[in-house]
Image (cartoon, rainbow, N blue to C red):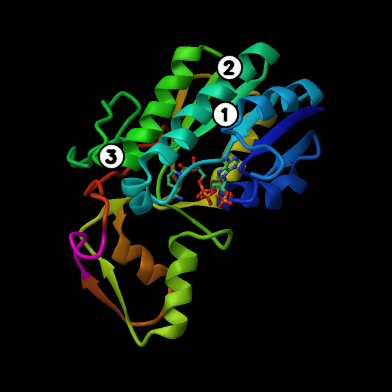
Amino acid sequence: MKKVLVTGADGQLGLAIKAAKAAYPGISFLFTGKKDLDVTSPKQIDLFFRANRFDFCVNAAAFTNVDKAEEEIPAAYLLNETAPRLLANACKSHNVFLVHVSTDYVFDGTKGTPYTIDDTPNPINVYGASKLAGEKAIENVCCNYCIVRTSWLYSEYGTNFQTKILAKAKSLPYLEVACDLYGTPTYAPNLAVFLLNKIRDLAFVSNMEHFSDGKTMSWYDLAKQLTTVEIKTTTAIFNLKAKRPMNSALKVKT
Ligand SMILES: NC(=O)c1ccc[n+]([C@@H]2O[C@H](COP(=O)([O-])OP(=O)(O)OC[C@H]3O[C@@H](n4cnc5c(N)ncnc54)[C@H](OP(=O)(O)O)[C@@H]3O)[C@@H](O)[C@H]2O)c1
């Protein structure tokens, strides 16, 4: 029986993993939210790793509010850089394989075609820079790990593009959504299955992977798929505090 710790388990991805767990009878899960295991606390991590045995740690905890990160820079780095470093060190000491989730926002969005794992990151906002710093922190610790970059997570779980669009569609006569930001939307439950299959099959063979199940499209295109409410197009320059990569589509190995 493989044992898996999931941190940040009350967030979108954590909830999607919880929902998928019944299909993995060969895996036993330890789900921890912020109140059970604060991944920014060296002491809590140390105590938790000493008290519990597991083979994999899936780090689904993160500072994910892209606009708020511009104003709360230390908090973004604490969660997106320091916490992965602390987890990587604990994983190294306890012989645990770290599965860390990162983002398409490590790229600047100017390439024009989907980004591969060989492309050079160049973040253009605090969120992307802090997530890239987290990737580097893990690489430097040299535990056994895989960083899985994903993009535009949406689902019925937690708070995300889909839940926000559907909430607005209930109360507004029409929506306005940017039509000039492109990426590859990823249904969070499919990311959960991708990660759990890899764990079940011991199939993490490289230190970096890209995962998305979506085709390249705009925020507007995605919103159109999610609601029948009228949607007017707008441009990213309006309303958004943080700069966004104009096309951060990920290329997934097939
Ligand atoms: N969402 C996207 O569109 C997207 C796109 C690409 C990559 N990703 C990456 O995918 C991963 C999962 O994203 P997600 O959408 O599931 O994020 P999410 O819904 O924001 O979940 C993150 C979770 O981490 C928790 N957390 C915050 N501080 C913590 C702490 N100190 N200790 C433990 N947990 C803490 C949060 O709790 P509170 O809410 O209570 O603070 C939240 O439950 C992240 O690494 C993210 O960077 C996300």
Q: Which mark is residue 99?
A: 1
Q: Which contiguous range is marked in magenta?
A: 234-240
Q: Amino acid at mark 2?
A: Asn
Q: Residue at label 2?
A: 89
Q: Residues within 10 Å of mark 3 (few under 14, many from 20)?
A: some
- Which residue appears at 38% of the width and 84% of the height? 172
Between discs 2 and 1, the one toward the N terminus: 2
- Which residue appears at 57% of the width and 15% of the height? 144
- Which residue appears at 46% of the width and 64% of the height? 162
Question: Is the shortest distance between ligand 1 and the CB of mark 3 under 8 Å?
Answer: no
Is 234 placed left or right of 222 in the picture?
Answer: left
Q: Residues within 10 Å of mark 1 (few under 14, many from 20)?
A: many
- Is 181 magenta? The answer is no
Q: CA distance from mark 2 to mark 3?
A: 32 Å
Q: Amino acid at mark 1?
A: Val
Q: CA distance from mark 2 to mark 1?
A: 13 Å
Q: Residue 36, percent across and down? A: 72, 41
Is 80 placed left or right of 71 in the picture?
Answer: right
Q: Nearer the viewer, residue 138 or 29?
A: 138
* 81 lies above or below 66: above
Q: Residue 71, percent across and down? A: 33, 48
Q: Residue at label 3?
A: 114
Is 110 placed left or right of 225 in the picture?
Answer: left
* 141 lies above or below 192: above
User: Is residue 152 visible in this depiction of the protein?
Assistant: yes
Q: CA distance from mark 1 to mark 3?
A: 23 Å
